[in-house]
Image (spheres, coloured by chain):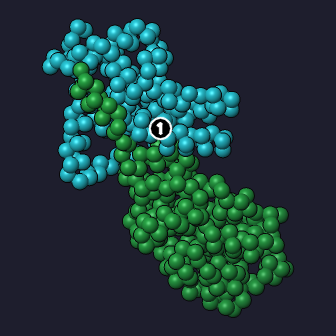
Chain colours: A green, B cyan
Amino acid sequence: MATVMIDLKRLGDVKAPAGFAERVLAQAGMADSYAVFDTVLGPVYVAWNRLGVSAAMRSKSSAEFESWFRKDVGRQLVRVDPPADLAAKIEDQLEGRRRLRFDLRGLTSFSQAVLSKTLEIPRGQVRPYGWIAREIGHPAAVRAVGTALANNPIPYFIPCHRVIRSDGVIGNYGGGGPEAKKNILTLEGVQLKRLQQLARAGFRYEGVRSTKVFCFPTCYHGRAAKEQNIVQFHSEQEAYSAGYRPCKHCRPAVVA
Amino acid sequence: MEGTERVFERLVHEHQHRVYALSLALTGNRHDAEDVAQDTFLRAYRALATYPPDRIRELKQKAWLHRIAVNVVRNRVRGVRPSLVELNGSEPSLSSGPEDDVMRKAEIDELAARVACLPARYREAVVLRHVQDLSYAEVAEALGQPVGTVKANVHRGLKILRGENHGDGDD
């Protein structure tokens, strides 16, 4: 009798395995899971929870990613084996074939608006910072837009690299500096050289003679025109006085 | 809502070993034990979210978690396995420690497997009384049974464990 009871008592002293509490909190949505994925951009650390992808970073190590996440996002983090389909979903997202859900809790509503707007910029296109500011109803807050994008917790996924300065300068990039930004844009099919030539000459917009519509130079709807039908403008006013109206897709100016 | 999360976080850290040990004793293997223990806490989490603050304050956490865990195990046996996991599929990492730890672990596992062979009503009673060290009154409350029934079931369960004929006893 006694030995059985002593044995049973030992059974009661068993400890939960390492990381158990964190896994429970992760399942309750109170901690995020993360794993490292091989992507077209190289290895990227990605964190997610029930609401969606919450962070992404090209960190050097797990330790670096974890400490950045805890400090910046402020939640607990658990490394897990990713669900079988997540790698394919991430690849699709980065190649523009899919829209994942994102968890932007904890950011200001301004930052959330900036990032949501950024998600609307199609792959292969770019917009100026001022465009985001105007579209979210804060036309004067151009610098604040820059700050919000610089602190984007989910670069690559939320394509802050598609926002550049209107003078053609690529601008800073939290996801690995201006060089990384150029590389990603080139990977997405943006003709950076042409874009910068236009910008250096002071041209902001391109119009099509036949339709009398003007666009941002990377807008898909303007690119189908023949080269000899394309005309460049320095400003909205110039386009308007030539009898052109803004494109309804890329909205280079407020569409009436 | 914020309050609930803080309560839950403390609940998990405070009771994780107890709930895991209970789950191991009831299921007999570490894989199922992790599942049961996780389910137990997730049910607790969902329940807490619906409780008014004074009910949360007065909650006897230990007894409450025991009751949930026993129910989770009963439901699994009935084949009702609520699938809770979508994005967060995770496997427990079975890290092996130094060698005497491995030895001890093997002994524990064997004992857990033996306990798991007991018929459910004896197993629940024995585990709560002698593994978890609850009083007969607490066991009775957790199982929703009269104290006399619990005592009898503990007694019969121990008898089977002591003898070699674990399995069919006087079932």
> From what the image shows, is residue A83 above or below residue B72?
below
Q: Residue at x 58, y 86 (%)?
A: A194
Please, what is the three-letter code of the amino acid marked with disc 1?
Answer: His
Screen quadrant of the C terminus of chain A: bottom right
Q: Residue at x 20, y 13 (%)?
A: B168
Q: Residue at x 63, y 69 (%)?
A: A151
From the viewer's perspective, tell me whether residue B150 is left or right of residue A64: left
> From what the image shows, is residue B4 above or below residue A196?
above
> From what the image shows, is residue A19 above or below residue A191?
above
From the viewer's perspective, tell me whether residue B64 is left or right of residue B130: right
Find residue A105 and report its image quarter: bottom right
Screen quadrant of the N terminus of chain A: top left
Q: Chain of mark 1?
A: B
The residue beneath circle 1 is B15
Q: Residue at x 49, y 55 (%)?
A: A77
Find residue A123 and report its image quarter: bottom right
The answer to whether residue B169 is visible is yes
Q: Position of residue A174 (x, y in %)?
A: 58, 75
Q: Position of residue B17 (x, y in %)?
A: 41, 39
Q: Position of residue A155 (x, y in %)?
A: 55, 67
